Structure formats: C-alpha cells, structure tokens
Image (cartoon, rainbow, N blue to C red):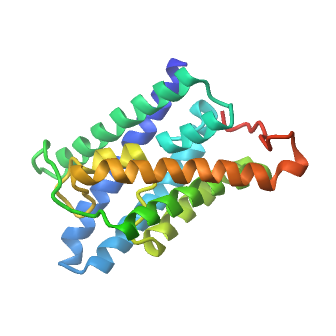
Amino acid sequence: MSKKLAGEFIGTLFLVTTVVGSGIMAETLAAGNDAVALLGNSLATGVMLTVLITVIRSLSGAHFNPAVSVAFWVRKELSHSQTALYSIVQILGGICGTWLAHLMFDVEILQTSANARLSLGSFVAEVVATFGLVATILGTLRVNPNWVGATVGLYISGAYWFTASTSFANPAVTIARSLTESFSGIAPTDVAPFVLAQLIGAVIAVVCFGFLRRSETDQFGFVTSNLI
C-alpha cells in the first residue's frame, strides 16, 4: 500500500506542478492574452497527464484525483480506508506541487488566490467536466486499459475549452490551486462548491455507466477493472 500511496503523491505533485507552472509560464509569455495562456496551460496539462497515467497506472492506478478514487469506491473497487488514504496523499501531493511550481519560478511560495470563479455556470461545468472524466476512464477501461493515459489527457485538454470553469474536475487540484495567486488560481471560498460539484459528477458517471452496462454485467452493472 505504501508504494501505491507514493505513486499517488508523486503523480498528483507533478500534475499540479504542471498546471500551476505552465499557468505561470503561459501568463508571462502571453503578455495578457488569456486565450494564448489557456492554450499553453491546457496542452501542458493534457500531455503531462498522459505521461503520468501511463507511467504510474500499474503502480497505483494513477487516480491523482479524489473524485476518481470516490468513483472506484462507489464501484466497490476501493475500500473505505484506501479511498481515504488515496485522497489524503493526493491532496498533500497537490499542495506540494503548487509550492514546487512557485519555487521554480522564484515567486513567493506561500500564497492564496483571489481569483473568484464560482457561479451557477461554473458549478454545472464542474459536474459535467468530472462526469466526462470518470466516464472517459470507465469507458476506456472497457475498450483497452492501455489507452487510459491518452484518452484522459485528450479529454482534459479539450474540457479546458468547452467548460465554463476550465475543467478543474479534481478536488486535490482545486484545493492546491487555491494556494496560488496566478493564472490558474481559484479563491479559497470557491473550493468547497467546486469539490461538491466534482463529487456529484463522479457519482453520476458511475451510476450512468453502470446502468448502460447492466445488461453485460451483474445486476448492479459493476465491472471489476484492472485500473487498481
């Protein structure tokens, strides 16, 4: 279990370092052009997710995301304790990832964001974004588990652009991004509603996927994957 937790910590650390670091870099190079900054941020995040999932999936399952861990708990593929431990190390890894990005770019390490993002539209967007993420994972596992890294990376890069919230879709990333006063930040007061929306989206995805696959599986539609 310790190796799995280490994998989740390291993976989430590098994921958030990429999100925050590429946000700082993109904001600097884009000279005020938010569209260009978002393009750089989304491409870097999608590519890094593909790499991290491909490399770490066989070790821990490469969740890097408490919402994904909760989804597999709902599917009875993770125990209560595993889900809690995964979520804790993911959050810690994300926070350390933000601090590492700040350290690399020579900015103040300890920050909080003033970037207000919460609205009805962004709440709905987080439900949709996380639903799509979990559905992508579950669907890909049915087709070919080796494609999960690529499909998730592509999905997240696309979701940056079609969702009003720019697709946080991850409680650990959301918490970590509240600790940066940069392009990718989110106000701490907006974190709890975003996390709630993400968990709702994850659970809905599991329920819908189970319903769609019910005829091919057991009465609950749960399929044991090899993600974990």
Q: Is residue 217 visible?
A: yes
**Residue at the (48%, 39%) spot, across then down:** 66
In the image, residue 150 sits, relative to residue 226, either above or below, namely below
Quarter of the image where one finds residue 13: top left
- The quadrant in which the C terminus is found is top right
Residue furthest to the front: 120
Is residue 165 in view from this perspective? no
In percent of width and height, residue 63 lies at 54, 41
The N terminus lies in quadrant: top right
| Residue in the image at 73% along x and 48% along y | 141
Choose top left, top right, bottom left or bottom right for residue 172: top left
Q: Position of residue 204 (x, y in %)?
A: 61, 52
Residue at image position (59%, 31%) is: 59
- Quadrant housing residue 121: bottom left
Label total for image: 0
169 or 191: nearer the eye? Answer: 191
As drawn, which residue projects farthest toward the left? Answer: 108
Residue shown at 44% from the left, 68% from the top: 160
In the displayed structure, 5 sits above or below 171; it is above
Describe residue 187's horizontal placement relative to residue 92 as left or right.
Answer: left
Residue occupying the far right of the picture: 215
Question: Which percent across, then down, holds residue 96?
Answer: 28, 37
Relative depth, front residue between 141 and 178: 178
Position of residue 94 measured from the top left corner of the image (x, y, whole percent): 34, 41
* Residue 158 in the figure: left or right of residue 226: left
